């Protein structure tokens, strides 16, 4: 499978069948190979309407939006308007946190690489006006600092909203308008929709929850999350081809198809250069750059980003050596499983290396002293409790806060087993993956101060 025709043949023979097996109502795939984008779609955009998914249908890309926001910030760096190692307060003096010392120290680079350290899952709706992001930033003043800036990776949605506000301030326009003028138009992308007002002009995927007891996925009650979170990924929508077009610019050292420079080659390289390691290989990669998730380092670099909104999931992976990018957009079901079904064989054939192996629980879990792991770890959106039952088995209970329940979060109880190196792993997969819990920073009593699942949650008790 080396040509675009062979890619089309593979996807055509695989996508519909695998989407059906995985309970995915609709999926759209785009692959960049030999400088050409090929795309295919299958399924229905809503099980309520039965509208067919086509390659010109748009899906929400969720947190992949963050890479677009990072690109806008790096354009500011290219133009000499922002310095990566300058405190964000240099440009947004109104930025405050509960910890003022931290607020004054956090840099643009730390925000881009999720090292700011303040609690980042805040989804407050501040209205639909052009000032929604500005109002959101005002709310950050009450957020606690979880760890010192620059000392750890912890995925931070609020940090990217703050970066979106930086773009607004330095460009004297809205984030959506800056994105349209400085990325969408130069790249000639046809259906990128920053909000529902643009999306309604196109064939639009609806997210799905479930399936219910009857085995049918149900359309989500909301189409999009709050506009205040737009720079972090609450509503940006596009076709798979549009997202592959953005990836093509990144692979072309920042050049648009017509030769216009969108981003400097230095910024392209900086965005995909590993800057901070994650405690363990997780669904969020092994390291992070200035916006990109790094799945594999070294000579066979693989990077990308995933996204999730209400019932929609998106995936992008890029291999710069092979000049290949793979996009999958979905609207429900086992999206993670479908991504592996499609992306892994494509990458193996086109680049010589598939997706990194995901962690799996050991057949014979080692005996460990479980005392350092037991307890409750929390932030404002979820409480995670690790406990041991009378039979000696370890359990993780996750209790989402009401704000997360509104977005589809559910309480769960999952068995854990030892995984080595101060880590536990789920015995059974969650959304297609065995999630690893890394425990960090043991205190004087030997108990770990944090549990890390892509986000760092501090011990509450």
Image (cartoon, rainbow, N blue to C red):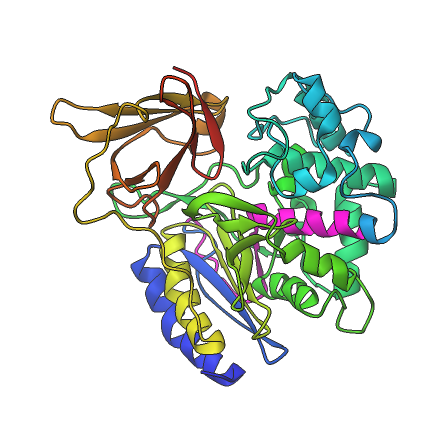
The one of 169 and 435 positioned closer to us in this rendering: 435
Instruction: Determine the residue positioned at 36% across, 41% down.
Output: 436
- The quadrant holding residue 139 is top right
Instruction: Determine whether 36 is above or below 334 in the image.
Output: below
Q: Is residue 54 left or right of residue 265?
A: left
Q: Position of residue 183 (x, y in %)?
A: 76, 57
Q: Is residue 59 inside the magenta stretch? A: yes
- The quadrant holding residue 344 is bottom left
- Give the magenta-colored segment's residue range: 48-75
Instruction: Determine the residue positioned at 24% across, 42% down.
Output: 427
Instruction: Determine whether 231 is above or below 33 in the image.
Output: above
Q: Is residue 253 inside the magenta stretch? A: no
Does the image show residue 200? Answer: no
The one of 379 and 135 positioned closer to us in this rendering: 379
Q: Position of residue 18 (x, y in %)?
A: 34, 64
Instruction: Determine the residue positioned at 25% across, 43% down.
Output: 428
């Amino acid at each position: 499978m080396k040509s675009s025709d062979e890619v089309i043949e593979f996807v055509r023979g695989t996508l519909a069948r695998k989407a059906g097996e995985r309970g995915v109502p609709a999926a759209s795939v785009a692959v960049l190979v030999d400088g050409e984008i090929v795309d295919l779609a299958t399924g229905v955009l809503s099980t309520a309407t039965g509208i067919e998914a086509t390659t010109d249908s748009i899906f929400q890309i969720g947190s992949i939006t963050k890479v677009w926001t990072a690109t806008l910030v790096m354009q500011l760096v290219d133009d000499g308007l922002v310095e990566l190692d300058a405190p964000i307060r240099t440009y947004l003096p109104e930025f405050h946190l509960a910890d003022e010392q931290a607020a004054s120290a956090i840099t643009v680079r730390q925000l881009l690489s999720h090292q700011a350290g303040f609690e980042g899952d805040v989804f407050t709706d501040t209205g639909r006006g052009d000032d929604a992001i500005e109002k959101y930033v005002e709310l950050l003043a009450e957020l606690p600092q979880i760890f010192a800036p620059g000392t750890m990776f912890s995925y931070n949605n609020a940090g990217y909203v703050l970066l979106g506000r930086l773009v607004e301030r330095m460009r004297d326009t809205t984030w959506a308008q800056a994105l349209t003028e400085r990325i969408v138009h130069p790249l000639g992308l046809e259906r990128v929709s920053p909000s529902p007002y643009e999306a309604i002009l196109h064939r639009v995927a609806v997210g799905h929850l479930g399936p219910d007891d009857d085995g049918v996925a149900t359309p989500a009650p909301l189409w999009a999350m709050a506009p205040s979170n737009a720079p972090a990924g609450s509503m940006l929508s596009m076709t798979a081809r549009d997202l592959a077009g953005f990836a093509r610019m990144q692979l072309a050292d920042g050049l648009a198809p017509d030769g216009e420079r969108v981003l400097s080659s230095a910024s392209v390289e900086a965005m995909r250069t590993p800057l901070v390691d994650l405690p363990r290989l997780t669904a969020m990669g092994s390291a992070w750059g200035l916006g990109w998730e790094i799945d594999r380092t070294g000579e066979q670099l693989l990077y990308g980003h995933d996204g999730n909104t209400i019932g929609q999931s998106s995936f992008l992976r890029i291999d710069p050596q092979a000049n290949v990018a793979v996009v999958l957009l979905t609207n429900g079901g086992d999206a993670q499983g479908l991504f592996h079904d499609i992306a892994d064989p494509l990458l193996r054939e086109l680049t010589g290396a598939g997706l990194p192996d995901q962690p799996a629980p050991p057949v014979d879990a080692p005996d460990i002293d479980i005392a350092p792991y037991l307890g409750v770890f929390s932030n404002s959106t979820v409480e995670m409790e690790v406990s041991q039952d009378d039979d000696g088995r370890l359990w993780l209970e996750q209790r989402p806060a009401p704000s997360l329940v509104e977005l589809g979060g559910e309480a769960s109880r999952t068995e854990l087993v030892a995984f080595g190196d101060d880590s536990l792993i789920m015995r059974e997969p969650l959304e297609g993956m065995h999630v690893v819990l890394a425990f960090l920073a043991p205190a004087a009593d030997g108990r770990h101060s944090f549990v890390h699942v892509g986000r760092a949650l501090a011990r509450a008790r």
